[in-house]
Every structure is written in C-alpha cells, then in structure tokens.
Image: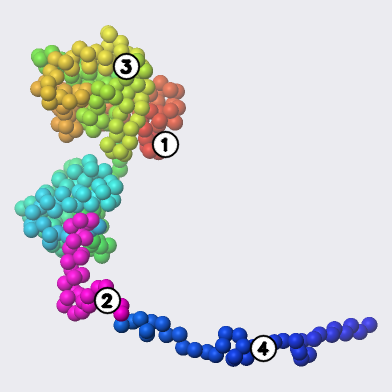
Amino acid sequence: MDIVIVTSFNKPQKDVFLPQNNEVGGKQKSCDILAGIGPSIEPTFPKCLGKDMVDLEYELKKYYELTKPRLVNPALYNHDLDQLLNAVENWWIRTQRKSGGTFNRRRNLLEEMAKSPVFPIDLFDLDPDQVYYHLTWKEENYDKVSNRNGKDAMRNRWRALTMYAKAIGKDVSNWNYVPPKPGRPKHKIIPLPKDVYRMVHYHYSDDPYENALYQHLFFHGFLIGPRPDSEFSILECKNVHYEDKYVHFYQPKVGAWRLIALEPEVMTMATRKSYKNWIEKWRPKVENQKSGDYVYLQPNGKPFTDNYLRKQLNVMGKRVWPQFHPTVCRDWCSIARLIESDFNIEKVRKWMEHSDLRVT
C-alpha cells in the first residue's frame, strides 16, 4: 500500500501582505539624536591624561590604604616597628577575623626576629634570603636535647612570617623554605587527685587574702575547666548567678559565650571554696575604685591581665606539683568528668565547649 503525503510548502502563498516603504513605518530615516544634543552636554569629569592620571591613581590608592586597608603598606610607617605591627594586628583581627591572642604570640616572634643580633629580618623590606638565612641559622642553634620544642618553635616562626607576608601582599610559595615536620606528640601528664587536693589546700602566702585567692583559683579551675588565664581574668560578678547556679563565661579564643550549670558546692556551699564565699567574703577585702566588676582581684585591688594571671598560676602551681602549667586544670577537668559520666564523650564535649569531638 502506497502512502502519499501532500504538502503545501512549495505552493505560492497569495494571502501574504508585504508592506511597502510608504505604508507601515514610512521611509527609513537617520535617527541621530545624540548629534543634535551633543554640544549642550559638558563633560562631568576633567580629562586626566599621562602624569595627571598616574598621580590621581596614586593618591586614591594611598587614601584607600589609610582609610580602609585591605593590605598593609610598610612604607607608610617610617620604620616605626610598633606602628607597623599595630597595622598588621588591625588587618589580622578585622580583615581576617582571627584571634588577638594568636597575633600577640606571633607579634613577639616577629619583634624577636627583627631585633635578632644574627641575620635580622627587615620587616619593612621583607626579603626571602633574609628569611631563609635567619630560619636556618635559628634551627641549627636550637638545643638538640629539646628537639621537639625546636621543631615547634621553627614552625611557629614560619607561621608568623607567612602571616606577615600575607598582610603586606607577598607570596611565600616560592621562597624555597620548608619548616621541619612536627615530632611525636608528648603524652599529657596530669596530676593525681591527691596532688589536686594539695594544690587546693596548699599554704601559698602569709597574707590571708592572697592565700585564699590562689586556693579558690585552683579549686574553680580544676572543677570547672575554663581556659584559666583568658576566661578567669575577665570573669565579672554579674555573670555569676547564685540562685540559678550557673556562670556565664566569655571565651576570647572563639569570641562566644558559654553557660555552665554548676554544683551547689561550687556556687553557694558555705563550707567550700564557692563563688558566693569568694565574692561576698573575700573579694570586698581588697576592692577599690580600680577593681571594676571583676571576680578575681590582685591583693592591690586591681584585676588580673591574662598574661600576669598565667604567670602567677604557673609559679604557684609548681610549688606543689613541678609539672604544673595552667592548661593542666582544663585537661584534668575534662578527664575527671569523662570518668564521672561513664565516658560520655559528647556530654564532656558540650561541657568543655570543644569545637569537635576529636578534640575531646
């Protein structure tokens, strides 16, 4: 059977209407509107050519760097190292949104490298050769006994330099320096419960207030587990709530608050070194106009700085337990509460405010 398909594609279409020039739209005309109004429009911006254009670009760039610095220009600080590092700190905290404590440690390293008697590093004209010679010389002259400390120190110096290079817009990928690999991590040594008991009840000073101060600091540090220097030094009385039995700690390391519900023996118990005993009985003995609302005060009534509190805790703790350093309090609290909770890692992670379960 044959199938025939008939199409009309090739047939002439008589009903198609094609307009002529005089019918739809009229004849084609030139519509050059801009030519008619052009002479009346004056240029808004003056012409900047050649040297004027270069000068204008330089001034705008300089103004931008001074008002909203995306990068730091060492040439603007007239070889004033403090001002230069202040600008880098501003870049680190505001632009990179990093921790001020981390920068303070790296700033100390940068100042040390800039003032080194052998192979000093000129931070105003950062040169890869200077960096290489300084780091290799420093690595060769570290104490070979504390090999891990030397490796960690070199890595910290390299981190400080790469941070600074990034701040001034330099690429370190082609500097041909590789920091040493980290050694094996050391096993953490924490005190036994009897050692903690001794630290809480040790006689630190003949001054009753100073003696009570460090006893309370160690008691709160081991049971609560905050970062002893940074979180204790800025804790205020308004953040300690007796009736509800919780404390609000601000964490400078992560820039956030954390709420900790505590046992009555830590908050209100009269026979313990509780917060209520400390704030109502001991703190008023030295409080003055310089005390502010801070919980822990020095014997002269002034609040602690984080560095000074860390130093004092280090000195006092080593009297009782020679291996002590302030972070031991946090480690001990974490392990003690892990045992108490029958190894409920998630519960301890929330208590310690760890960012990840692997940290716990």
Q: Which label sits on residue 18?
A: 4
x then y, percent, for residue 91: 23, 52
Q: Earlier in the sequence, mark 2 or mark 3?
A: 2
Kindly report the distance in space between the C-alpha atoms of the residues bearing marks 1 and 2: 64 Å
Q: Quadrant of the N terminus?
A: bottom right
Residue, disc 2: 43
Amino acid tagged 4: Leu
Q: Residue at x 15, y 45 (%)?
A: 108
The picture quadrant where one finds residue 134 is: bottom left
- Numbered-mark total: 4
**From the viewer's perspective, is residue 268 above or below residue 239?**
above
Do the CB atoms of the residues marked 1 and 4 lie less than 8 Å apart?
Answer: no
Q: What colour scheme governs how the chains and residues are painted in the rendered image of this protein?
A: rainbow
Kindly report the distance in space between the C-alpha atoms of the residues bearing marks 3 and 4: 93 Å
Amino acid tagged 1: Leu
**From the viewer's perspective, is residue 66 above or below residue 148?**
below
Q: Residue at x 40, y 30 (%)?
A: 350
Kindly report the distance in space between the C-alpha atoms of the residues bearing marks 1 and 3: 31 Å
**From the viewer's perspective, is residue 39 above or below residue 232?**
below
Residue span colored magenta: 40-69
Dot 3: element: loop
Kindly report the distance in space between the C-alpha atoms of the residues bearing marks 4 and 2: 46 Å
Nearest to the eye among marks 2 and 3: give it: 2
The picture quadrant where one finds residue 263 is: top left
Residue, disc 3: 242
Amino acid tagged 2: Pro
Q: Earlier in the sequence, mark 1 or mark 4?
A: 4
Q: Nearer the viewer, residue 110 or 129?
A: 110
Give yes or no for residue 88 being in the magenta stretch: no
